[in-house]
Each structure stands twice: as structure tokens, then as C-alpha cells.
Image (cartoon, rainbow, N blue to C red):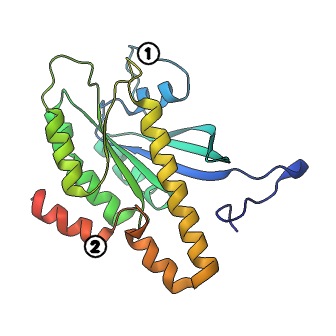
Amino acid sequence: MNGLGAPAVGGAGKPTPLLIRILMIGDSSVGKTSLVLRYDKRGFNLRFTTTIGVDYSDRLLELDGRQVKLQIWDTAGQERFHSLTTSFFKRAEGFVLVYDVSNRQSFESVSTWMKDIVEQGKRGSDVVICGNKCDLQGREVAREEGEQLAAELGVPYMETSAKENLNVEETFGNLASRVKTRLEASQAATDGAGAGETLRLNGGRNGGVDTESLTQRMESCCT
């Protein structure tokens, strides 16, 4: 079942948790690492540490009575690590695309990162756009701009603050729940209707990114 349908049984008769891999992407210094550390219960550190390549952390949680192992990959946003970062896209079921509300350039990069998801990621992957550092006073990107872009791209939008621990749990929890629902629906389609139906579902009918329609939306709103 690959952990998608009826839970597999591990050691000592315990069900094997469903593995969901989440990739943190976005420009450098937008706060990806801070969000991961806050979600991983390690608090907030004012000292900025640049991620080199890719780091990851695990979090075990329960969604609708099923155990889920959330593996979060924290990636470097610097251009020199771009090829390494995109090599992980095909392995992720979900993406947290982060920009800094006090840095307009990082917001303008969102469309480029979305293009990478379309071109490099799994078909039907779930995405949430995250406007981080919303606790800051000198913001350069209004909340309405973030909401509008997310709506045009057909993905959810959240505003977060790792420092204030605002909407961090909700961002990861909601994304994990959406991925779980999609994976289980896809597995059910495989069991009940055959591979042809699975391909149709994986095209975005169950809440993931429909790459064809997303490409069309990006061409109209991001060029």
C-alpha cells in the first residue's frame, strides 16, 4: 500500500506512519529556517544562520486518527544552491513557499519559485504561499497583495511570524492535512478504479496543483 491506503504494520504490530515530505522554498533570508525551528519546538533565535544546501527535521503528528511523519526539508535560497534545491522537488509531496513581507524582491520571486514547482515538482503537489515576518512594522508587501497572488495561482495563503509564533502550527498542519487527503484519495482511486483514474486525480482534482491550469494562470498574472 506504500503507506497510503490501509496503514502498513511496523514493528511490534504498530501501524507505520504515513510519510509526508515538505520542502521549504523561497529566497534567502525570508525566514524559512526560523519557521521550521519554531514548528520543531526549538523556539526562535534572533541570530541569523544561513542554511547551507538542505537540512531537515521530523515531526510526528496525528491527523484524523492516523499517524503522520512530517519530514520538513529546509533549503538554501541562494542562487548558488539552486540546482541542489530543485533536485529535491520531485521527492516532495508539499511545498511551503515563503517570502518576507518586508522585502518586496522576495515577493516578486514567488512566481519564479512557482514555475520551479510546476517544472520540477511532482504532478499535483500541494503548495501554500507564506508571507513571513508579519510582525514587522516596515512591511513592503500588503496582505492583500499576497492574498491576491495566491488566489490567482490557485493556492492557499498564510501570514506568519516565527518570532511571535503566529500561524506556524496552522501552516504546517493544514498543508499536511491537504497532502494526506490527496494521497489517500489517489490510493483509493488506484484500488477502486485503476491507474487511468489515478492519473486524472493526480492532475489536481483532489486539491493539489493542476500543473496545466497553473501554467496558464502564471502566464496571465506573472508575466
The residue indicated by pointer 1 is 45
- Number of residues whose C-alpha sits closer than 10 Å to that of mark 2, classed few (under 14), some (14–19) or many (20 or more): few
Of the 4 image quadrants, the one containing the N terminus is: bottom right
Give the amino acid type for the residue marked by disc 1 in the picture. Asn
**Residue extending furthest toward the right:** 12
Left or right: where does residue 113 sit relative to residue 178? Answer: left
Instruction: State the SS at label 1.
Output: loop
- Of the numbered discs in the image, which one, if any, rests on residue 212? 2
Res 119 quadrant in image:
bottom left
Left or right: where does residue 209 sit relative to residue 153? Answer: right
Q: Position of residue 113 (x, y in %)?
A: 28, 52
Q: CA distance from mark 1 to mark 2?
A: 40 Å
Q: Relative to 138, does residue 35 appear above or below in the rendering?
A: below
- Number of residues whose C-alpha sits closer than 10 Å to that of mark 1, classed few (under 14), some (14–19) or many (20 or more): few
Q: Relative to 84, does residue 209 appear above or below in the rendering?
A: below
Q: State whether residue 200 appears in this view.
A: yes
Q: Position of residue 116 (x, y in %)?
A: 31, 58
Q: Position of residue 162 (x, y in %)?
A: 39, 23
Left or right: where does residue 35 sit relative to residue 145? Answer: right
Give the amino acid type for the residue marked by disc 2 in the picture. Glu
Residue at image coords 14%, 34%:
104
Q: State whether residue 52 appears in this view.
A: no
Residue at image coords 75%, 52%:
16
Instruction: State the SS at label 2.
Output: helix
Residue at image coords 22%, 52%:
151
Left or right: where does residue 122 sit relative to residue 143? Answer: right
Of the 4 image quadrants, the one containing the C terminus is: bottom left
Q: Which one is in front, 83 or 74?
A: 74
Q: Position of residue 13 (x, y in %)?
A: 88, 52
Res 217 quadrant in image:
bottom left
Q: Nearer the viewer, mark 1 or mark 2?
A: 2
Q: Relative to 17, does residue 45 appear above or below in the rendering?
A: above
